[in-house]
Structures are given as structure tokens and as C-alpha cells.
């Protein structure tokens, strides 16, 4: 199975829809990681990676949304260096994504 990141999001022309899609994907990936149905590596391939982060920045999306994805790019380090904080990091991403969607 070959995984891709979110190229279809970058093809969207409706900026609010791009923003909502990224926030919803962040929420879904975090829930899937917690539930064990998506690995952290897969989440990194799909959304939480520096390439996607750079694309979002280039699109000029809100800093609060960029911060959400940036936190996702740090999950592997959190898991490796301070594993007892991993759940808190996931919860922070989810909280920020929900706040963004409001």
C-alpha cells in the first residue's frame, strides 16, 4: 500500500474549505492514533510532516492552523523523548483543532 499526503486539499480553491479540511484531518488522525487504527508514521505521511507544513505556510493559512500541524510534526519526538506527555500532545492538537473549527 502506498500512502500519500493531502494533495487533494491543495487542489481546492475555496480557502475556508482548505482550512476546515486540514483541521478535520488533524482531529481524525489524532483520534485514529489514540484508537490504534492509524500509526504515528502513517499520520506523518498523510499530514503531520514538514512538506505539508511548508505548503500550508505558502498558502498563507492562519497561524493557528499551521501551529496545529506543527504540533503534529513533533509527535514522534514527544513519543520518543517524553512518552508520558504523548497523550497530552494529542489532546492539545485536538483541542486547538476544535477551537479552530468553532
Image: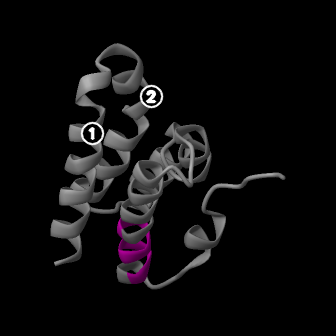
Across the whole image, how many numbered discs are drawn on residues?
A: 2
Q: Position of residue 63 (x, y in %)?
A: 24, 54
Near-viewer residue (53 or 87):
87
The answer to which quarter of the image holds residue 45 is top right
In the displayed structure, does residue 43 sit left or right of residue 3?
Answer: left
Depicted 14 relative to depicted 86: above or below: below
Which region of the structure is painted magenta? 17-23
Could you say whether the residue bearing mark 1 is in a helix, strand or loop?
helix
Q: Is residue 19 magenta?
A: yes
For the view shown, which residue lies furthest in the right direction? 1
Near-viewer residue (9 or 101):
101
The answer to which quarter of the image holds residue 56 is bottom left
Could you tell me which residue is drawn at 33 percent across and 62 percent down? 61
Q: Which residue is mark 2?
A: 76
Could you tell me which residue is drawn at 23 percent across and 28 percent down? 85
Which of the two labelled residues, at mark 1 and mark 2, occupies the earlier sequence position? 2
In the displayed structure, does residue 1 sit left or right of residue 39?
Answer: right
Could you tell me which residue is drawn at 40 percent across and 50 percent down? 34
Q: Position of residue 26 (x, y in %)?
A: 40, 59
Could you tell me which residue is drawn at 35 percent across and 60 percent down? 60
The circle on residue 87 is 1
For the view shown, which residue lies furthest in the front direction? 35
Could you say whether the residue bearing mark 2 is in a helix, strand or loop?
helix
Amino acid at each position: 500500500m502506498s500512502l500519500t499526503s493531502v494533495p487533494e486539499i491543495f487542489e481546492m480553491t475555496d480557502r475556508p474549505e482548505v482550512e476546515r479540511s486540514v483541521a478535520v484531518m488533524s482531529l481524525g488522525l489524532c483520534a485514529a492514533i489514540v484508537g490504534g487504527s492509524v500509526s504515528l508514521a502513517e499520520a506523518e505521511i498523510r499530514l503531520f510532516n514538514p512538506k505539508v507544513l511548508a505548503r500550508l505556510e505558502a498558502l498563507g493559512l492562519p497561524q493557528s492552523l499551521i501551529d496545529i500541524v506543527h504540533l503534529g510534526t513533533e509527535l514522534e519526538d514527544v513519543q520518543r523523548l517524553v512518552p508520558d506527555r504523548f497523550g497530552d500532545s494529542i489532546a492539545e492538537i485536538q483541542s486547538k483543532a476544535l477551537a479552530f473549527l468553532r
